[in-house]
Image: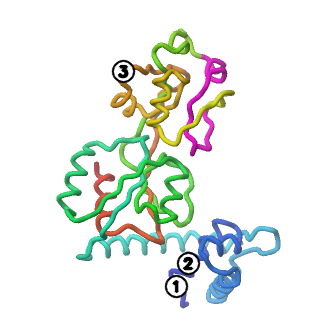
Amino acid sequence: MNYSIETLRTFVEAASLKSFSAAARKLNKSQSTVSTTISGFEDDLGFTLFDRQGRESTLTFAGRKVLSLVEDILSADERLQALRVELLPDIEPRLSCAFSDTYQPPHAEHIVTTLDRQFPHLEFEFLIAENNAVIEMIQNQQAHVGMMESRTEYPADISFSRLPIQGELGLYVLDSHPLAKEKKITYQHLTMTRQLRLSSSSQIIINSEKNWFAPNYLLLLEMAEQGAGWAILPTWLVKQFGHNRLVSINYDLWPRKIDVDLVWSKNNPPGKAGYWLINKLLDS
């Protein structure tokens, strides 16, 4: 058989999106190019990978078997490319990172100072983003490395790795807010009181009838300090920037531990400095 990494990536995108046309848009190719690539791959294998009868292009039994192996091949190729980058003498001139406020790495200051010593001529950009905004910045090449609250599935073009230490989120409100005076907080208390929420979050953990929005946790914290409502906030952020004015609401299983992932692009992977930072964060 004679197939390329590009053919395998096209197959994975088509399988993930269940649509040749959607895969074509994602890969910036024509639909005919994607169809021809998949058909050629099927000819090389000698069997059909997709059931094309319905509105969606779903995998056949053989296609599901092949997908598992192809993902392993692409994962091995990604590791090989990462090793190649690490061993190259050249360093990328600029490294942009989109990090979530849900987690503060241990020894963060040490990692930053070591990065400066290791790559003294590197131009470094630190960005704050949450949830889907992190993935969009990676896909749009606005950032090379991202950090975000983990999820069960990622787009096919995104690599991820779980950080070794969990973050923590809690429910917080101003110490003089009426909620802070309640002896026992109920679901009704929270739903009837204004919630301060992230603009980028599609996950509604508690569906309050009144909502104000902000693009990041730090702004939500400032709004909570003004007594505007209650908010889900990272515990470390409240301790460091909350000016001892916010109190934790003990409700249900809150505060909650959360898993946090590092993410980066498979199609436009980080350079030497980017992989160095990934490895440092994973080892912290």
Labels 2 & 1 near each other (Cβ < 8 A): yes
Res 178 quadrant in image = top right
Residue type at mark 3? Asn
- Image coordinates for residue 186, horizontal then vertical, percent: 61, 17
Q: Is residue 146 left or right of residue 230?
A: left
Q: What is the secondary structure assignment of the residue under circle 3?
A: loop
Badge 3, how many Cα within 10 Å: few under 14, some, many 20+? Answer: few
Q: What is the secondary structure assignment of the residue under circle 2?
A: helix
Q: Residue furthest left?
A: 117
Magenta segment boundaries in residue numbering: 186-205
Res 235 quadrant in image = top left
Q: Is residue 53 left or right of residue 154?
A: right
Which of the marked residues, 3 or 1, is nearer the chain's N terminus?
1
Whole-Å distance between the Cαs marked 3 and 2?
54 Å
Q: Is residue 188 left or right of residue 121?
A: right
Residue drawn at 65 percent across, 69 percent down: 15
- Residue at the disc numbered 1: 4
